[in-house]
Image (tube, grey):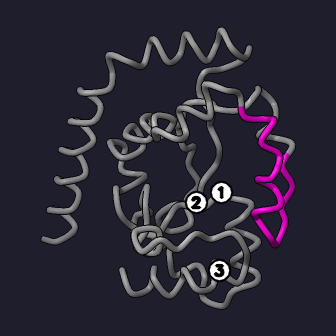
Amino acid sequence: LYSLLKRLVDVGLALFVLVVTIIFWPLIILIVKMISPGSAFFLRERVGLGEKRFLLYKFRTMHDGHEEKTQIKENFAEERGDKKRVFSFGKLMRKMRVDEWPQVINVLRGELSFVGPRVDFADYYELLKNKIPYYQIRTIIVPGLSGWAQLHDKVGNSVETARENLGYDIFYI
């Protein structure tokens, strides 16, 4: 019953967000394509329920091609240090969380929930799964756009903080 109710709330909220924001999508797509050639969307493989892989949808905020150049590092903050790869409108979209709007598609498809263990990039998930015992327990429920740790202002930027955040995920589960 809880799972059904949570899913109904997720779908209802996702439809509401989609209806309210969809009118702005063509304008955002046009601006992104004018500023930086390439797709207006950023698709990256994530790990979801039962370690199933899926593509997460976001509006692209970086110059095309910069997403693929990232390396897996134990201190994730090092990788995020190059702010030049984010274009000016992308910075604004990130600040206002507009780049996250397309994730409602993932929620409608059942790949994401609004709240659950924060969804990981596939490469980070593999790194953390090999470094943190029982890390894969996070995949026994649908991952979320935001997690219990993020709701408590915990940001994962290293293996050590990911280990701490796993405690929040287990508490939520």
Q: Quadrant of the N terminus?
A: bottom left
Which amino acid lies under the numbered mark 1 shown in the image of this protein?
Answer: Phe
For residue 121, which numbered disc appears in the image? 1
- The residue that mark 2 highlights is 47
Neighbourhood count class around disc 2 (C-alpha, 10 Å): few under 14, some 14–19, many 20 upward: many
**Residue that protrudes farthest toward the bottom in the picture:** 133
> For the residues marked 3 and 2, what is the alpha-carbon distance in whole angstroms?
19 Å
Q: Position of residue 128 (x, y in %)?
A: 71, 76
Q: Nearer the viewer, mark 2 or mark 1?
A: 1
Q: Are marks 3 and 2 in contact (CB under 8 Å)?
A: no
Which amino acid lies under the numbered mark 2 shown in the image of this protein?
Answer: Val
Q: Quadrant of the C terminus?
A: bottom left
**Marked residue nearer the N-terminal end (3 or 2):** 2
From what the image shows, is residue 80 above or below residue 152? above
From what the image shows, is residue 23 above or below residue 1? above
- Stretch in magenta: 70-86
